[in-house]
Amino acid sequence: MSADGNPALEAIALRRDLPGDPPATLVADASLSIERGSFTTIIGPSGCGKSSLLYMLGLIDRPTGGTLLVEGRDVSGMDGDARAQLRLERFGFVFQFHFLLPEFSALENVMLPIRRLGRLAPADGKARAMDLLRATGLDGKEHKTPDRLSGGERQRVAIARALANDPALILGDEPTGNLDSHNSQRVVELLKALAHEEGRAVVCVTHDLSIADASDVRISMLDGRVRSIERGKGNSAP
Amino acid sequence: MTLGNPALLLHIALRHLTARRRQTLVAVLGVAVGVGFFLAVSAMMVGSQNDFISKLIDAAPHIIISDELRSPPEQPGLRAFSEGAVELRGYKRRTEVRGIRGWPAIIATADALPGAISSPSLSGGITLKLGGHDEALTIIGVEPELESQISSIDDYLREGRLHNLETTQGGIIIGEEMATRLGVRMGDVVAATSAAGNSRSLRIVGLFKRGQSQLGSTTGYVLLREAQSLLGRPFIINRIGIRLSDPYAAETIASGLEQRFGYKAESWQERSADFLSLLVTRNVIMYSVVSAILLVASFGIYTVVSNSVSDKRRDIAIMRSIGFSQADLQLIFVAEGLILAIIGVLFGWALGYGLMTILGSLDFPIAGETQHIPLDRSPRQYAIAAAASLTAGVVAAWLPARKAARVDPVDILRGAI
Ligand SMILES: Nc1ncnc2c1ncn2[C@@H]1O[C@H](COP(=O)(O)OP(=O)(O)O)[C@@H](O)[C@H]1O
Ligand SMILES: [Mg+2]
């Protein structure tokens, strides 16, 4: 990780308009900063623009206005390939639904980003994927395809895959939305540890207020706007 | 454009295909059947064409110089008064020359061409008689040593050899039909009479196979000396056959000889112009059929890849979010088309090979002989089939693959379809 003092993510007046008749604004004037080592949640009623904001922060969607800095770097002018490369190297995503490739085993799913990046020799890449699966409690399930894993297990495979290239940023869109409370708890602990113990910036959209309460920073949204940014228990903010 | 490891992209493409076995199988079969039948059909078409051309080329000399003038000189009267007030019609033009004058010079010129062999001959009409039965026959007097080098007469003989003309005094070779009509067999003697009033006894030393239209049932071969004396035209020849090392040079060489010596020099191409243009039509038909087959095969590939793209929109979005580029996605789906085409080609090759083996083993009795279908089994046809199928596969996969590259991951990820 870079040693400079830049925040992991910085958004200035970020905006997303949808063309159409009438044009719609999904996100307006979102300014925020995400620190390394912090666990941030985004909350708000359904349809208020949380996912839209998260996808812009994760370079999956392009803002129609404002500025976004990733680790101090302005990404506004980047073309699609450069954004894809940055996602590959610096970001990990976890979605509400597991979004694993159905024809590939847990291990192969986790190896996908590693092989695409191509920096590790095949054997090393495999060893790393095995380590990640072990760390997420999936010992012995490496060769199962997603349809033979439980919901909690799938989501943990997805987290392992998000971690494959050792990203600085982990973004989750309701990663516990589909899990029972036990599994949900486990996933949240995992994500928190990634922030607090490994120094990554973790941002999660969630409906679960108990998760939001346990986070370091809580961003509330309403009607496409950021309404408030609150520091939580302050147990780990740098 | 950034691209991931090709092995990874190929791996993903293969998984997509193995996950939809039935469709994959249908598309592969489409290509395989197309390729297989193309190979079988083209082997027959090209094979029969080659067989046909080699018969055209080899049955008769590559160039035949005859004692005809192609554009006869104008009558002296017309030459002298070309703008005269009196129109002259019905003049007899000198279209026929009795024998080729200065033929040794022509032969010397032809023989000087690298690898060329020329053979002089004299033909004329005679009558064969046996027991009150008469048959008209055109005899061709040849030097067997030379003639056997410029045409494949020996191949058409049921019995005897051209060389027998030299070893047997007064030998003649006639067709089986003629022999049947006269009621003679090998070794029998017939009486021959010419318009010049000469007559002698000739012994049958060879028989052409029945149904050789190239030679005709009313043609016979004798020694050149024999023909000259029987026809009463000593030292005269009226035809020179030339065989070249490169048959395809015949047209140019023939026109050169004709210009230089004035006698009509006809190449095998000119002789068979009608047939050759027929072959062009045949080829156009064949390649149209092949294109249609490949078009149908590429529909199968298009369907599979197109369905694969629609089914995999979610996976496409996932891969894009992970950091796969648009080019990666496009290549994955183009690779699917290419894989289908490659497997199809391999099966198609096997199918084509099998079909050709079956076709090659069939026997056809034609004119009392067992004949095989002439087949061209050259690797060229395999290469053409493969190149065409692979191109069709890539083209058919291209459009859906472009659609895959343009999938916007946002809606899919948000919607969690
Ligand atoms: N492609 C689209 N066209 C029109 N409206 C859209 C589109 N995508 C999202 N929306 C709308 O934009 C708003 C924000 O969506 P989203 O960011 O997914 O909300 P959240 O994640 O907070 O539930 C919602 O009202 C949604 O219906
Ligand atoms: Mg949402």
Image: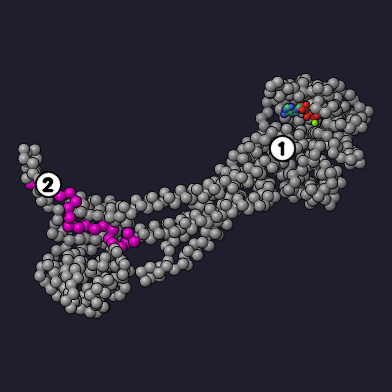
Q: Quadrant of residue B171?
A: bottom left
The residue at the point 71 percent across, 37 percent down is B317
Q: CA distance from mark 1 to mark 2?
A: 86 Å
Quadrant containing the N terminus of chain B is top right
Chain of the residue under the numbered disc 2 shown in the image: B
Going by the image, does B45 lie left or right of A184? Answer: left
Quickly name the residue at label 1.
Answer: B317
Element assignment for label 1: helix
Going by the image, does B63 lie left or right of B78? Answer: right
Does B62 appear in magenta?
yes
Which tag, 1 or 2, sits closer to the chain's start?
2
The residue at the point 74 percent across, 42 percent down is A113
Residues at marks 1 and 2 on the same chain? yes
Above or below for A213 versus A122: above
Q: Position of residue B184 (x, y in %)?
A: 24, 77
Quickly name the residue at label 2.
Answer: B74
Q: Quadrant of residue A19?
A: top right
The residue at the point 78 percent across, 32 percent down is A2
**Residue nearest the observer in this picture, B127 or A137:** B127
Residue extent of the magenta highlight: B55-76
Going by the image, does B5 lie left or right of B276? Answer: right
The residue at the point 83 percent across, 34 percent down is A174
Does B359 appear in magenta?
no
**Residue nearest the observer in this picture, B257 or B223:** B223
Above or below for A123 versus A45: below
Q: Position of residue B144 (x, y in %)?
A: 24, 69
Residue flagged by tag 2: what amino acid is it? Glu
Crowding around mark 2 (Cα neighbors within 10 Å: few <14, some 14 to 19, many 20+) is few
